[in-house]
């Protein structure tokens, strides 16, 4: 049955719930693209805007550097599990709130509480990302030295889990900004972050990998030099590189947040 003119006029005046705008954007919105080069370029400029992020990131860089040294020095599986468990707990209790404050500093937003970023980090298991990648590297070294079929299967499984966790973390990387800036609860902040970034996972991964290339190279170097008696010199080097890479990534997410907040647009709906 064809629609009448009266019904057509009524539909034209109707306001869709999807068009409603809240503090962050529209219920259904279109996020602007985040070019990798432009994001990194602006993040580098933001790196030197304040000394506070560097100071706040120091604890996390020390924890990561010492963990990498101990994990490659470990001679037993028990030692590896013990250091990994300690690293996981410290990442939640100490690094997560400090990273949140660092992101807030780059983005120019207020710092509000330590418990919520700790719970946020625990929700999407952020510390497991470096743990799984380091495990994959250890397995790869084992494959090269022993050519074990079991190690190859374990490596592939660990890499799949690591990449899936990595993408999940990337899509949630703006949740802290949203939670602090817009005072949303944890679930809403995570949902908003996913809504803004889920279509740009590859771009964010490219930015993330670019930001951490120096650290990746230094970790591989430590893995290769693990039997060298002078390996201790690598720890301060990794600390310094971690400081730079972590700060660059946090500046990148802060730039992404500002860009998305400024340029997000509502979806366009066709009218009858």
Image: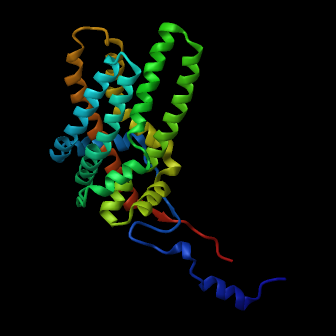
Quadrant including the N terminus = bottom right
Asked where in the image residue 24 lies, by quadrant, the reply is bottom left
Residue 168 horizontal/vertical position (percent):
48, 45
Asked if 103 appears above or below 29 in the picture, the reply is above
Q: Is residue 58 left or right of residue 18?
A: left
Quadrant including the C terminus = bottom right
Q: Name the residue furthest right.
A: 1
Asked if 137 appears above or below 97 in the picture, the reply is above
Q: Residue at 30%, 45% (x, y): give it.
A: 250
The number of callouts visible is: 0
Asked if 208 appears above or below 33 in the picture, the reply is above
Whether residue 42 is visible: no
Residue 103 horizontal/vertical position (percent):
28, 50
Whether residue 146 is visible: yes
Asked where in the image residue 72 lies, by quadrant, the reply is top left
Residue 233 horizontal/vertical position (percent):
20, 17
In the image, 52 versus 210, the foreground residue is 52
Residue 164 horizontal/vertical position (percent):
52, 39
In the image, 214 versus 69, the foreground residue is 69
């Amino acid at each position: 049955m064809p629609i009448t003119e009266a019904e057509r006029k009524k539909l034209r005046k109707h306001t869709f719930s999807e068009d409603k705008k809240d503090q962050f954007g529209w219920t259904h919105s279109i996020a602007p693209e985040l070019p990798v080069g432009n994001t990194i370029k602006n993040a580098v400029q933001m790196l030197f805007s304040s000394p506070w992020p560097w100071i706040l990131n120091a604890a996390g860089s020390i924890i990561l550097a010492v963990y990498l040294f101990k994990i490659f020095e470990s001679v037993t599986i028990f030692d590896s599990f013990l250091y990994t468990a300690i690293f996981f707990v410290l990442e939640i209790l100490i690094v997560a709130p400090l990273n949140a404050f660092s992101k807030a500093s780059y983005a120019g937003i207020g710092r509000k509480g330590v418990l919520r970023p700790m719970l946020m980090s625990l929700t999407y298991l952020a510390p497991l990302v470096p743990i799984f990648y380091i495990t994959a590297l250890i397995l790869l070294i084992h494959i090269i030295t022993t050519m074990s079929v079991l190690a190859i299967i374990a490596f592939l499984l660990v890499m799949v889990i690591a990449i899936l966790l990595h993408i999940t973390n990337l899509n949630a990387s703006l949740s802290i900004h949203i939670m602090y800036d817009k005072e949303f609860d944890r679930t809403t902040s995570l949902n908003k972050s996913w809504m803004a970034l889920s279509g740009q996972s590859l771009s964010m991964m490219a930015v993330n990998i670019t930001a951490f290339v120096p650290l990746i190279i230094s970790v591989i170097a430590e893995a290769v030099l693990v039997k060298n008696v002078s390996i201790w010199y690598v720890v301060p080097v990794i600390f310094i590189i971690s400081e730079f890479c972590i700060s660059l990534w946090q500046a990148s997410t802060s730039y992404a947040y500002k860009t998305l907040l400024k340029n997000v647009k509502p979806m366009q709906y066709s009218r009858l």
